[in-house]
Amino acid sequence: MIFKKAMVLFVFMFAATSAFAIDGVTGIEKYEVDRDHTNIVWYISHMGFSRTIGHFKEFEGTVELNYDDPDKSKIHITIDTDSITSGVEDLDRQLKSELFFDVEKFPTAIFESTNITLTENDRAEVKGNFTMLGKTNEITLNVRLNKRAMDPILNRMRTGYSIRSSMKRSTWGMDQMLAFVSDDINITIEAEALRVD
């Protein structure tokens, strides 16, 4: 349920903002998602009483930012579904079971961008294929570029993004317990990525 989504996004996802217009920047930059400064958080309604909140702890991603031709930027994010956590052990076991993520059979969820559209200088709409439970469907990430600057400690270029998305878990065949756990999943991602020389 938790749904990862992404997304993954995954998201994620973060790479997408590569296409953002930054004065004086040209060419292609390659980045790796900084897991120490990235959070993939999901929210889902529990029968309308409250929202259950959780996140994915393990993921990796690469981003290729093409400043000359933003549409050719690329993002690839892989999420370890067994790393899903809600803070409640019984719920986590259920989420990892065949009822939901079936982590033994489907250990990963993957996001791959297909199209990036700039909506403002610091914002973009990123469409991509999200694969989970053996099914692939398109999702959209709304991405804001927060900052691009040299990390003074690591002496490497760092970028930061805020990402929002939503999805219906039943689209991927995760249709159990819909009377108790909502079909709609909201995703919030705060992400940073470091340039690879």
Image (cartoon, rainbow, N blue to C red):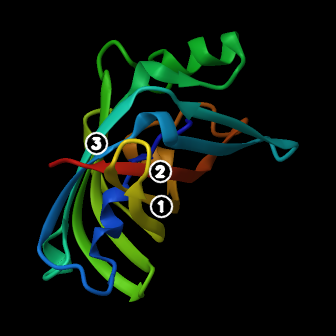
The alpha-carbon separation of the residues under discs 3 and 1 comes to 14 Å
Q: Amino acid at mark 1?
A: Tyr
Position of 39 compared to 47: left or right? left
The image shows a total of numbered marks equal to 3
Q: What is the number of the mark on residue 191?
A: 2
Q: Where does residue 172 sit, x and y in percent of width and height? A: 38, 43
On the image, the x and y values in percent for residue 9 come to 39, 48
How far apart in space, not on screen, are marks 2 and 3 (Cα)? 11 Å
**Position of 147 relative to 54 (above/below):** below
Q: Earlier in the sequence, mark 3 or mark 1?
A: 3
Residue 61 shows which numbered tag? 3
Q: Which mark is residue 14?
A: none
Mark 2 or mark 1, earlier in chain: 1
Asked if 22 appears above or below 183 in the picture, the reply is below
Residue visible at 60% across and 43% down in the picture: 42
Residue type at mark 3 is Gly
Callout 2–callout 1 Cβ contact below 8 Å: yes
Task: Classify mark 3: helix, strand or loop.
Answer: strand
Tell me the residue at 70%/21% (across/down): 87
Q: Can the viewer see residue 26 in this picture?
A: yes
**In the rendered image, the vertical position of residue 60 relative to residue 156, given as above or below:** above
Nearer-the-camera pick, 150 or 120? 150
Quarter of the image with the N terminus in it: top right
* Residue 61 position by quadrant: top left
Question: Which one is earlier in the sequence, the residue at label 2 or at label 3?
Answer: 3
C-alpha span from label 2 to label 1: 5 Å
User: Going 28% across and 61% down the picture, which residue do you hit?
Assistant: 128
| 10 sits to left or right of 78 | right
Type of amino acid under label 2: Ala
For disc 1, the marked residue is 161
Tell me the element at label 2.
Answer: strand
